[in-house]
Image: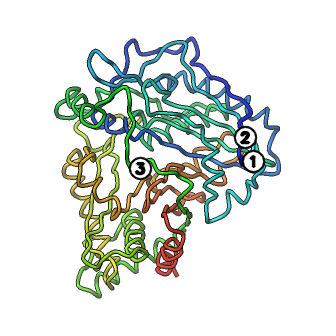
């Protein structure tokens, strides 16, 4: 029997009073890259002794979603291929709506929310399934799943329409509406805010290269591997862990003649720890160049800056490279931190230099690359209280890479949650031993 059973589905429409864009919203070049890598999925788990009846929860979630779509109407639309121009855009009409799936599960939600090791089979069933390989496709779908003593909210959103910051902006607005409060941010879907050289023609040229068979948007790639084949674990670093890690990095830098010019950020320190653990848990040759890839939000760094409430994709890629031998040496943590900081500094100097991450060198090196997603700045636990307390756990479901790390602010609002995906269970055990030894 499936661990998660679908028991119904309906659509939540946009209120008749909402203002819809008169024409499809064409994707920018930054967004066009995601047409063939569309899935962005997260799940939030809630449990407690005083949860209201599930039917009451459903009513509140649906009514508040409708309220939220008044300001987020394009999320209820569809992503379409505009044949006349070759572009891809978000089409909105009064008949559109967000598919709302209702499910149930006999799994133990307390264990699901508390275990370090993920039950990937159950977690994958808690987000709505959407086929995004062919246009037109839904932009957003949600799922509510009933457990004994709790429930889950799962979201699937097209990555060409929203990045992580956009997703959490929407969740915050939805949760605020469910609590009967006014959202803090006013969203905007105005793509003209993102100024890139080449404008719309650049977006069109990107689509011609990466998705030449539109409306088919399928990508034959290892990225499409079965999620359940991966081993995943989550570690939570508290503020003391992070402080000890920073001190250790500074000490190693001084001891081995590579002092850091400034104290590392939590992001740089944790990424360096993950990267060195990755290098040690896999049988790379000493002279193999290992890659580290991460995204940076460029809203505040573009000229002019993009509105904080922008719902779209505004990311640039950063790539660091070090030999496996160096990532296993005594100075590894300091060297890795310096490499991460160097990439961040380059991004600050030229925020759009790495926006086009669809290059052959990247795809050819997936077996030697650690991929970082998310950010310690994502306050999912703090903003996703729908009125029944903050989530007991939230996870990025689309961790389908052998060496992917997802980060967000921890449940206490101070530490950092680090989720790791590897293909081999034995390698995960090695990763854990290396990752935790520096925190002791």
Which disc is residue 5 wearing? 2
Q: Is residue 2 left or right of residue 240?
A: right
Q: Residues within 10 Å of mark 1 (few under 14, many from 20)?
A: few
Label located before the other in sequence (3 or 1): 1
Q: In this view, does 274 lie above or below 71?
A: below
Q: In what element is the residue under mark 2?
A: strand
Mark 3 or mark 1, whichever is nearer to me = 1
Badge 1 is on which residue?
1
Q: Do the residues labelled 2 and 3 touch (CB within 8 Å)?
A: no
Which callout, 1 or 2, points to the residue nearer the camera?
1
Q: Determine whether the residue tagged by mark 3 lies in a helix, strand or loop.
A: helix
Q: Position of residue 9 (x, y in %)?
A: 68, 28
* Residue 13 position by quadrant: top right
Residue in the image at 66% along x and 49% along y? 45
Mark number for residue 223?
3
Q: Up-down: is 233 above or below 389?
A: below
Q: Which colour scheme is used?
A: rainbow
* Tag 1–tag 2 contact (CB < 8 Å): yes
């Amino acid at each position: 029997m499936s661990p998660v059973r679908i028991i119904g589905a309906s659509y939540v429409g946009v209120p008749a009073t909402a203002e819809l864009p008169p024409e499809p919203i064409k994707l920018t070049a930054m967004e066009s890259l995601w047409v063939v890598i569309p899935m962005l999925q997260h799940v939030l788990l809630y449990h407690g002794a005083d949860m209201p009846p599930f039917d009451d929860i459903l009513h509140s979630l649906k009514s508040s979603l409708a309220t939220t779509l008044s300001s987020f109407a394009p999320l209820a639309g569809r992503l379409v291929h505009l044949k006349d121009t070759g572009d891809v855009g978000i089409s909105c009409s009064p008949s559109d709506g967000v598919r709302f799936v209702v499910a149930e599960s006999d799994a133990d939600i307390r264990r699901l929310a508390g275990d370090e090791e993920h039950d990937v089979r159950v977690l994958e069933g808690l987000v709505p399934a959407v086929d995004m390989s062919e246009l037109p496709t839904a932009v957003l779908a949600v799922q509510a799943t009933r457990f004994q003593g709790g429930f889950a909210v799962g979201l699937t959103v097209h990555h060409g329409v929203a990045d992580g910051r956009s997703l959490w902006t929407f969740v915050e607005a939805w949760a605020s509406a469910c609590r009967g409060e006014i959202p803090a941010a006013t969203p905007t879907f105005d793509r003209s805010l993102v100024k890139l050289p080449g404008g719309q023609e650049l977006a069109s040229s990107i689509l011609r290269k990466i998705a030449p068979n539109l409306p088919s948007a399928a990508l034959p790639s290892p990225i499409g591997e079965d999620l359940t084949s991966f081993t995943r674990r989550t570690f939570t670093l508290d503020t003391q862990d992070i402080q000890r890690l920073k001190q250790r990095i500074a000490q190693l830098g001084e001891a081995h003649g590579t002092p850091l010019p400034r104290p590392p950020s939590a992001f740089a320190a944790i990424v360096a720890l993950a990267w060195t653990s990755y290098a040690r848990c896999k049988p790379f040759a000493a002279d193999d160049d290992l890659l580290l890839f991460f995204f940076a939000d460029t809203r505040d760094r573009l000229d002019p800056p993009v509105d904080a409430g922008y719902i779209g994709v505004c990311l640039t890629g950063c790539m660091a490279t070090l030999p496996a031998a160096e990532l296993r040496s005594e100075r590894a943590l300091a060297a890795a931190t310096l490499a991460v900081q160097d990439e961040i500094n380059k991004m600050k100097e030229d925020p759009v230099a790495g926006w086009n991450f669809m290059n052959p060198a990247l795809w050819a090196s997936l077996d030697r690359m650690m991929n970082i997603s998310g950010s310690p700045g994502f306050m999912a636990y703090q903003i996703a209280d729908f009125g029944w307390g903050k989530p007991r756990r939230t996870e990025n479901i689309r961790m389908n890479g052998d060496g992917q790390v997802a980060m967000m602010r921890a449940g206490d609002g101070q530490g950092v949650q680090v989720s790791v995906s590897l293909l081999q269970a034995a390698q995960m055990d090695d990763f854990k031993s290396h990752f935790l030894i520096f925190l002791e």
